[in-house]
Amino acid sequence: MKKFNSIQEVISKNILELNKVYKIKIDGKEHKAPFTNRKCVYYEIATLFFNEKGVNLGFFNNYHSTDDLTVILEDNKCFNIYVNQLRPYLYPSYRNIITDIKRINKIKEEIFDGENYEHFIDIEFILEKDKEYYGLIGTETYYLPPEEPKGRPIKEFSYVLLLSDKGFINGKPQGDLTPYYIGFTY
């Protein structure tokens, strides 16, 4: 298998094109997912909270595995990726409404901000080894501070892997971005 070191390398050597959907698999160190105990190479868990109307107001207790991953392409090529370059759009592997009153009260104490939270849900997302996913390499822009006091911010970009278990339509991943990456900043 031909291995490349990074997203940057596969783009610079024209192995992959930007904004094109590919069928991929993910490899890496195996873990046991916290809620389901399923074998996976990446997991992410969070607790979502909702108001009395069922509107999702946010999440917390967010945790994810941090090991680097390997993206395997159909043509027997692969490349390494840091988890901070991943943008997973995944269907949950686990979703459970929290009903334990003691746990609900503890959660309310931890996130107290004056809102009336009524419902709490534990949620888990995983990437499984040897499962087929859809991937697209895109870019995200960000700004660095100006080099001079009255200068303009400096625009930069990073390559990221948008990954979906449901595919893409018109270049857009199907499903929602997982909670950890919703608030991702540089």
Image (cartoon, rainbow, N blue to C red):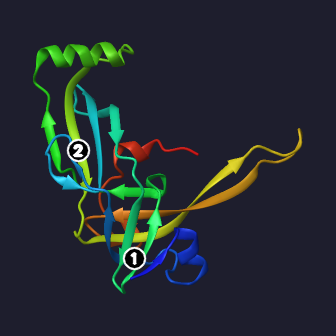
Q: Are marks 2 and 1 in contact (CB under 8 Å)?
A: no
Q: Nearer the viewer, residue 51 or 158?
A: 158
Tag of residue 54: none
Q: Nearer the viewer, residue 37 or 24?
A: 37
- Residue 181, horizontal then vertical, whole percent: 42, 47
Tell me the CA gap for discs 2 and 1.
25 Å
Q: Is residue 145 visible?
A: yes
Q: Residue at x 18, y 18 (%)?
A: 103
- Extreme-bottom residue of the structure: 75
Q: Tell me the SS state at disc 1.
A: strand
Q: Nearer the viewer, residue 142 or 69?
A: 69
Mark 2 vs mark 1: which is more N-terminal? 1
Q: Amino acid at mark 2?
A: Glu
Q: Which residue is mark 1?
A: 21
Q: Which residue is mark 2?
A: 124
Going by the image, does 145 lie left or right of 169?
Answer: right
Q: Residue at x 12, y 16 (%)?
A: 101
Going by the image, does 49 lie left or right of 14?
Answer: left
Q: Tell me the SS state at disc 2.
A: strand
Q: Residues within 10 Å of mark 1 (few under 14, many from 20)?
A: many
Q: Residue at x 58, y 70 (%)?
A: 8
Q: Is residue 58 visible?
A: no
